Image (cartoon, rainbow, N blue to C red):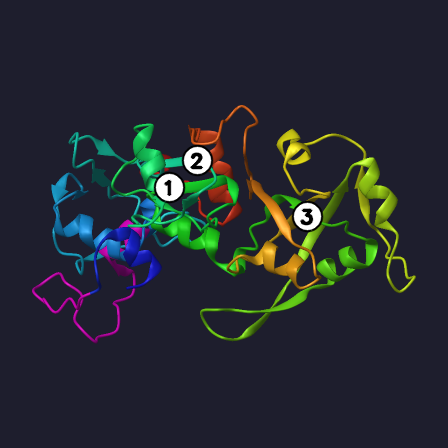
Amino acid sequence: MGFREYFSGRCSFPFSANPSGLAPVGSPMPKGFLRLDRIVSHTFGITRMAARDKILKGLVRLDGQKVTKASKLVATESSSSSSSLLSSEMKLELIDPFTGNRDIDSWRAHDHLILNKPKATITAMKSNSHKTVIDVLQKVNAFKPRLRPVGRLDLDTTGLLFFTSDGELAHRLMHPTYHIPKTYLVGVQSYVNSCDVERLLHGIRLKDPRSGKTRLARAIDIVVKGEEEARHLHKCDDGEEAANVNYENDEFDFEFSAAAGVVCRVKMTITEGMNRQVRRMFSSLGKEVVELKRISMGPLLLSEALAPGDVSILTDEQIKELRAAVGLDLISTNDK
Protein backbone atom coordinates (compact mmCIF):
# COMPACT_ATOMS: atom_id res chain seq x y z
CA MET A 1 0.00 0.00 0.00
CA GLY A 2 1.43 3.39 -1.00
CA PHE A 3 1.86 6.43 1.20
CA ARG A 4 -1.16 8.25 -0.22
CA GLU A 5 -3.35 5.15 0.11
CA TYR A 6 -2.17 4.85 3.72
CA PHE A 7 -3.80 8.21 4.38
CA SER A 8 -6.95 7.51 2.42
CA GLY A 9 -7.46 4.23 4.24
CA ARG A 10 -8.21 2.25 1.06
CA CYS A 11 -6.32 0.03 -1.36
CA SER A 12 -6.67 0.60 -5.07
CA PHE A 13 -9.18 -1.42 -7.07
CA PRO A 14 -10.24 -1.35 -10.73
CA PHE A 15 -13.33 0.52 -11.88
CA SER A 16 -14.94 -1.57 -14.59
CA ALA A 17 -18.47 -0.16 -14.66
CA ASN A 18 -19.23 1.44 -17.99
CA PRO A 19 -22.85 2.58 -18.30
CA SER A 20 -23.77 5.70 -20.25
CA GLY A 21 -21.95 8.77 -18.98
CA LEU A 22 -18.99 6.83 -17.56
CA ALA A 23 -15.44 6.73 -18.88
CA PRO A 24 -15.02 3.66 -21.13
CA VAL A 25 -12.35 1.36 -19.73
CA GLY A 26 -9.19 1.44 -21.84
CA SER A 27 -10.56 4.13 -24.19
CA PRO A 28 -9.04 7.57 -24.82
CA MET A 29 -10.60 10.35 -22.74
CA PRO A 30 -13.01 12.47 -24.83
CA LYS A 31 -11.73 16.00 -25.39
CA GLY A 32 -13.15 18.51 -22.90
CA PHE A 33 -14.07 15.86 -20.31
CA LEU A 34 -12.37 14.31 -17.26
CA ARG A 35 -13.31 11.64 -14.74
CA LEU A 36 -15.09 12.92 -11.67
CA ASP A 37 -12.54 11.46 -9.24
CA ARG A 38 -9.74 13.42 -10.91
CA ILE A 39 -11.71 16.67 -10.71
CA VAL A 40 -12.61 16.08 -7.04
CA SER A 41 -8.95 15.30 -6.25
CA HIS A 42 -7.74 18.51 -7.93
CA THR A 43 -10.48 20.78 -6.61
CA PHE A 44 -10.26 19.74 -2.97
CA GLY A 45 -6.53 18.97 -2.75
CA ILE A 46 -6.96 15.30 -1.83
CA THR A 47 -5.59 12.10 -3.34
CA ARG A 48 -7.36 10.25 -6.14
CA MET A 49 -8.03 7.32 -3.81
CA ALA A 50 -9.53 9.62 -1.18
CA ALA A 51 -11.65 11.25 -3.91
CA ARG A 52 -12.96 7.87 -5.04
CA ASP A 53 -13.73 6.94 -1.45
CA LYS A 54 -15.79 10.10 -0.89
CA ILE A 55 -17.65 9.66 -4.19
CA LEU A 56 -18.54 6.04 -3.40
CA LYS A 57 -19.79 7.10 0.04
CA GLY A 58 -22.11 9.65 -1.54
CA LEU A 59 -20.27 12.68 -0.14
CA VAL A 60 -19.90 14.51 -3.47
CA ARG A 61 -22.56 16.77 -5.00
CA LEU A 62 -22.42 17.90 -8.63
CA ASP A 63 -24.90 20.72 -9.33
CA GLY A 64 -26.68 19.76 -6.11
CA GLN A 65 -27.06 16.09 -7.09
CA LYS A 66 -25.34 13.18 -5.33
CA VAL A 67 -22.96 11.29 -7.63
CA THR A 68 -21.55 7.88 -6.68
CA LYS A 69 -19.67 6.93 -9.86
CA ALA A 70 -16.01 7.93 -9.73
CA SER A 71 -15.63 7.25 -13.47
CA LYS A 72 -18.40 9.66 -14.50
CA LEU A 73 -17.26 12.04 -17.24
CA VAL A 74 -17.59 15.73 -16.42
CA ALA A 75 -17.14 18.76 -18.71
CA THR A 76 -13.96 20.67 -17.88
CA GLU A 77 -12.90 24.31 -17.94
CA SER A 78 -11.57 25.22 -21.39
CA SER A 79 -9.58 28.26 -20.22
CA SER A 80 -5.94 27.40 -19.61
CA SER A 81 -5.70 30.29 -17.13
CA SER A 82 -8.32 28.80 -14.80
CA SER A 83 -7.12 27.19 -11.55
CA SER A 84 -10.12 24.81 -11.60
CA LEU A 85 -10.71 21.81 -13.86
CA LEU A 86 -14.47 22.10 -13.49
CA SER A 87 -16.55 23.98 -16.05
CA SER A 88 -17.64 27.35 -14.68
CA GLU A 89 -21.30 26.43 -15.23
CA MET A 90 -21.06 23.56 -12.74
CA LYS A 91 -20.95 23.55 -8.95
CA LEU A 92 -18.99 20.91 -7.03
CA GLU A 93 -19.48 20.36 -3.31
CA LEU A 94 -18.01 18.04 -0.68
CA ILE A 95 -20.20 16.97 2.24
CA ASP A 96 -18.85 16.66 5.78
CA PRO A 97 -19.87 13.09 6.81
CA PHE A 98 -20.22 14.09 10.48
CA THR A 99 -22.13 17.36 10.23
CA GLY A 100 -23.72 17.14 6.78
CA ASN A 101 -22.37 20.60 6.00
CA ARG A 102 -21.34 21.41 2.43
CA ASP A 103 -17.66 22.24 2.65
CA ILE A 104 -16.24 23.81 -0.51
CA ASP A 105 -13.08 25.17 1.12
CA SER A 106 -11.95 21.62 1.85
CA TRP A 107 -8.37 22.50 2.77
CA ARG A 108 -9.92 23.74 6.03
CA ALA A 109 -11.69 20.41 6.50
CA HIS A 110 -8.41 18.60 7.17
CA ASP A 111 -6.82 18.43 10.61
CA HIS A 112 -3.29 19.80 11.05
CA LEU A 113 -1.29 20.14 14.26
CA ILE A 114 2.22 20.40 15.66
CA LEU A 115 3.36 18.21 18.54
CA ASN A 116 6.41 19.13 20.60
CA LYS A 117 7.57 15.53 20.75
CA PRO A 118 9.00 14.55 24.14
CA LYS A 119 11.86 12.13 24.71
CA ALA A 120 11.35 8.39 25.07
CA THR A 121 8.51 8.27 22.55
CA ILE A 122 8.55 6.63 19.13
CA THR A 123 6.91 7.92 15.96
CA ALA A 124 4.47 5.07 15.42
CA MET A 125 0.74 4.47 15.55
CA LYS A 126 1.12 1.73 18.17
CA SER A 127 3.82 -0.21 19.97
CA ASN A 128 3.99 -2.98 22.56
CA SER A 129 7.34 -1.81 23.89
CA HIS A 130 7.41 2.00 23.83
CA LYS A 131 5.18 4.99 24.38
CA THR A 132 4.11 6.37 21.00
CA VAL A 133 3.36 9.88 19.73
CA ILE A 134 -0.27 8.76 19.38
CA ASP A 135 -0.32 8.01 23.11
CA VAL A 136 0.90 11.59 23.68
CA LEU A 137 -1.86 13.04 21.49
CA GLN A 138 -4.50 10.95 23.22
CA LYS A 139 -3.30 12.17 26.62
CA VAL A 140 -4.05 15.79 25.65
CA ASN A 141 -7.25 14.84 23.76
CA ALA A 142 -5.75 15.91 20.42
CA PHE A 143 -5.87 12.63 18.50
CA LYS A 144 -8.25 12.13 15.58
CA PRO A 145 -8.47 8.84 13.62
CA ARG A 146 -7.25 10.31 10.29
CA LEU A 147 -4.21 12.10 11.71
CA ARG A 148 -0.82 10.73 10.67
CA PRO A 149 2.69 11.96 11.48
CA VAL A 150 4.67 13.42 8.58
CA GLY A 151 8.14 11.92 8.79
CA ARG A 152 9.70 10.46 11.91
CA LEU A 153 11.73 11.55 14.90
CA ASP A 154 13.61 8.75 16.64
CA LEU A 155 13.14 7.67 20.26
CA ASP A 156 15.18 10.40 21.96
CA THR A 157 14.88 13.18 19.37
CA THR A 158 12.52 15.91 20.51
CA GLY A 159 10.76 18.87 18.96
CA LEU A 160 8.51 19.65 16.01
CA LEU A 161 6.49 16.74 14.65
CA PHE A 162 3.76 17.67 12.17
CA PHE A 163 0.51 15.70 11.93
CA THR A 164 -2.10 15.99 9.18
CA SER A 165 -5.09 14.17 7.72
CA ASP A 166 -4.25 15.55 4.25
CA GLY A 167 -2.51 12.74 2.40
CA GLU A 168 -1.42 14.83 -0.60
CA LEU A 169 0.13 17.50 1.63
CA ALA A 170 1.96 14.86 3.66
CA HIS A 171 3.23 13.13 0.51
CA ARG A 172 4.66 16.36 -0.89
CA LEU A 173 6.26 17.43 2.39
CA MET A 174 8.17 14.14 2.50
CA HIS A 175 9.02 13.94 -1.20
CA PRO A 176 12.63 15.03 -1.99
CA THR A 177 11.44 16.98 -5.05
CA TYR A 178 10.19 19.83 -2.86
CA HIS A 179 13.39 20.24 -0.78
CA ILE A 180 11.54 21.14 2.43
CA PRO A 181 14.15 22.47 4.91
CA LYS A 182 14.21 21.01 8.41
CA THR A 183 16.29 22.70 11.13
CA TYR A 184 17.69 20.96 14.19
CA LEU A 185 19.46 22.00 17.35
CA VAL A 186 22.29 19.53 17.85
CA GLY A 187 24.16 18.84 21.09
CA VAL A 188 27.49 17.16 20.26
CA GLN A 189 29.74 15.36 22.75
CA SER A 190 32.93 16.89 21.32
CA TYR A 191 33.92 20.15 19.64
CA VAL A 192 33.18 20.73 15.97
CA ASN A 193 35.88 22.41 13.89
CA SER A 194 35.71 24.21 10.58
CA CYS A 195 36.75 21.14 8.60
CA ASP A 196 33.89 19.19 10.12
CA VAL A 197 31.52 21.96 9.06
CA GLU A 198 32.99 21.93 5.56
CA ARG A 199 32.39 18.17 5.25
CA LEU A 200 28.81 18.47 6.46
CA LEU A 201 28.10 21.25 3.94
CA HIS A 202 29.75 19.42 1.03
CA GLY A 203 27.90 16.20 1.86
CA ILE A 204 28.55 12.79 3.37
CA ARG A 205 27.57 9.55 1.70
CA LEU A 206 25.24 7.45 3.84
CA LYS A 207 23.66 4.09 3.13
CA ASP A 208 19.89 4.16 2.84
CA PRO A 209 18.72 1.25 5.05
CA ARG A 210 15.55 0.75 2.98
CA SER A 211 17.02 0.65 -0.52
CA GLY A 212 20.56 -0.38 0.40
CA LYS A 213 21.89 2.34 -1.91
CA THR A 214 24.36 5.03 -0.89
CA ARG A 215 23.02 8.60 -0.98
CA LEU A 216 24.59 11.99 -0.44
CA ALA A 217 23.39 13.66 2.75
CA ARG A 218 24.35 17.29 3.23
CA ALA A 219 23.59 20.30 5.37
CA ILE A 220 22.46 23.48 3.63
CA ASP A 221 23.24 25.68 6.62
CA ILE A 222 25.23 25.28 9.86
CA VAL A 223 25.56 27.72 12.73
CA VAL A 224 27.90 27.01 15.66
CA LYS A 225 26.79 28.64 18.90
CA GLY A 226 28.69 29.98 21.91
CA GLU A 227 32.06 31.56 22.72
CA GLU A 228 33.77 28.36 23.86
CA GLU A 229 32.71 26.55 20.70
CA ALA A 230 34.12 29.42 18.62
CA ARG A 231 37.60 28.98 20.14
CA HIS A 232 37.69 25.43 18.79
CA LEU A 233 35.93 26.15 15.51
CA HIS A 234 39.01 26.96 13.42
CA LYS A 235 41.25 24.22 14.78
CA CYS A 236 41.39 21.64 12.01
CA ASP A 237 43.43 18.50 12.47
CA ASP A 238 45.17 19.05 9.14
CA GLY A 239 45.79 22.75 9.72
CA GLU A 240 43.31 23.84 7.03
CA GLU A 241 40.63 26.42 7.60
CA ALA A 242 37.20 26.23 6.00
CA ALA A 243 35.48 29.32 4.69
CA ASN A 244 32.02 30.69 5.45
CA VAL A 245 31.57 29.08 8.86
CA ASN A 246 28.74 30.82 10.70
CA TYR A 247 29.19 31.56 14.39
CA GLU A 248 26.73 33.19 16.75
CA ASN A 249 27.58 34.39 20.25
CA ASP A 250 24.19 34.13 21.85
CA GLU A 251 22.47 31.68 24.15
CA PHE A 252 19.95 29.29 22.69
CA ASP A 253 18.02 26.36 24.05
CA PHE A 254 19.14 26.43 27.66
CA GLU A 255 18.30 22.77 28.19
CA PHE A 256 21.17 21.86 25.85
CA SER A 257 23.63 23.93 27.87
CA ALA A 258 22.60 22.09 31.02
CA ALA A 259 22.36 18.67 29.41
CA ALA A 260 24.95 16.13 30.52
CA GLY A 261 27.56 15.43 27.90
CA VAL A 262 26.88 18.36 25.57
CA VAL A 263 30.17 20.03 24.67
CA CYS A 264 29.33 21.79 21.39
CA ARG A 265 26.01 23.29 20.24
CA VAL A 266 25.14 23.45 16.56
CA LYS A 267 22.10 24.55 14.55
CA MET A 268 21.89 22.59 11.30
CA THR A 269 19.43 22.61 8.39
CA ILE A 270 18.92 19.71 5.96
CA THR A 271 16.45 18.98 3.16
CA GLU A 272 16.71 15.19 2.97
CA GLY A 273 14.82 12.87 5.26
CA MET A 274 17.00 9.79 5.67
CA ASN A 275 16.70 7.58 8.75
CA ARG A 276 18.61 9.12 11.72
CA GLN A 277 20.35 11.36 9.20
CA VAL A 278 21.70 14.07 11.52
CA ARG A 279 23.08 11.58 14.04
CA ARG A 280 24.66 9.48 11.28
CA MET A 281 26.26 12.50 9.60
CA PHE A 282 28.00 13.53 12.81
CA SER A 283 28.87 9.91 13.60
CA SER A 284 30.71 9.65 10.26
CA LEU A 285 32.96 12.45 11.57
CA GLY A 286 33.59 10.62 14.83
CA LYS A 287 31.22 12.92 16.73
CA GLU A 288 28.42 11.62 18.93
CA VAL A 289 25.12 13.51 19.08
CA VAL A 290 23.74 13.39 22.61
CA GLU A 291 20.88 15.90 22.21
CA LEU A 292 18.77 16.52 19.12
CA LYS A 293 15.72 18.73 18.70
CA ARG A 294 13.87 19.76 15.53
CA ILE A 295 12.77 23.39 15.65
CA SER A 296 11.37 23.99 12.16
CA MET A 297 9.98 22.27 9.08
CA GLY A 298 9.46 24.45 6.04
CA PRO A 299 7.51 27.53 7.20
CA LEU A 300 6.46 25.82 10.46
CA LEU A 301 8.34 26.93 13.58
CA LEU A 302 8.30 25.31 17.01
CA SER A 303 7.05 27.88 19.52
CA GLU A 304 9.20 28.33 22.61
CA ALA A 305 5.94 28.47 24.57
CA LEU A 306 4.97 24.94 23.49
CA ALA A 307 6.03 22.54 26.23
CA PRO A 308 7.11 18.94 25.47
CA GLY A 309 4.00 16.83 24.99
CA ASP A 310 1.79 19.79 24.11
CA VAL A 311 0.19 20.48 20.73
CA SER A 312 -0.57 23.52 18.62
CA ILE A 313 -3.39 23.59 16.04
CA LEU A 314 -2.31 25.24 12.78
CA THR A 315 -3.93 28.53 11.85
CA ASP A 316 -5.36 29.17 8.38
CA GLU A 317 -2.32 31.32 7.61
CA GLN A 318 0.10 28.53 8.59
CA ILE A 319 -1.80 26.06 6.42
CA LYS A 320 -1.69 28.45 3.46
CA GLU A 321 2.09 28.91 3.83
CA LEU A 322 2.65 25.17 4.15
CA ARG A 323 0.57 24.32 1.08
CA ALA A 324 2.27 27.06 -0.93
CA ALA A 325 5.67 25.59 0.00
CA VAL A 326 4.78 22.36 -1.82
CA GLY A 327 2.87 23.91 -4.72
CA LEU A 328 -0.67 23.21 -3.53
CA ASP A 329 -3.19 25.94 -4.32
CA LEU A 330 -6.09 26.78 -2.02
CA ILE A 331 -8.76 25.95 -4.56
CA SER A 332 -12.38 26.73 -3.77
CA THR A 333 -15.40 26.59 -6.03
CA ASN A 334 -16.32 29.96 -4.46
CA ASP A 335 -13.44 31.52 -6.36
CA LYS A 336 -15.14 31.18 -9.73
First reached walking from the N terminus: tag 1 or tag 3: 1
Q: Quadrant of residue 331?
A: top left
Residue underneath mark 1: 133
Q: Amino acid at mark 1?
A: Val
For mark 2, give the secondary structure: strand
Residue underneath mark 3: 188
Query: For mark 3, does the 10 Å Cα neighbourhood hold few (<14), some (14 to 19), or many (20 or more) residues?
Result: many
Q: Amino acid at mark 3?
A: Val
Please report contact status of discs 2 and 1: CB closer than 8 Å, yes or no: yes
- Indicate which disc residue 115 carries: 2
Give the Cα separation between the discs numbered 2 and 1. Answer: 8 Å
Horizontal and vertical percent position of residue 21:
13, 61
Q: Which region of the structure is painted magenta?
A: 13-41
Q: Name the residue located 89 percent from the left edge and 57 percent from the top edge.
A: 241
Query: For mark 1, does the 10 Å Cα neighbourhood hold few (<14), some (14 to 19), or many (20 or more) residues?
Result: many
Q: Name the residue located 38 percent from the left edge and 37 percent from the top edge.
A: 112
Give the Cα separation between the discs numbered 2 and 3. Answer: 24 Å
How many marks on residues?
Answer: 3
Residue 261: in sight, yes or no?
Answer: yes
- Vertical comparison of 180 with 202: above or below: above
Q: Quadrant of the C terminus?
A: top left
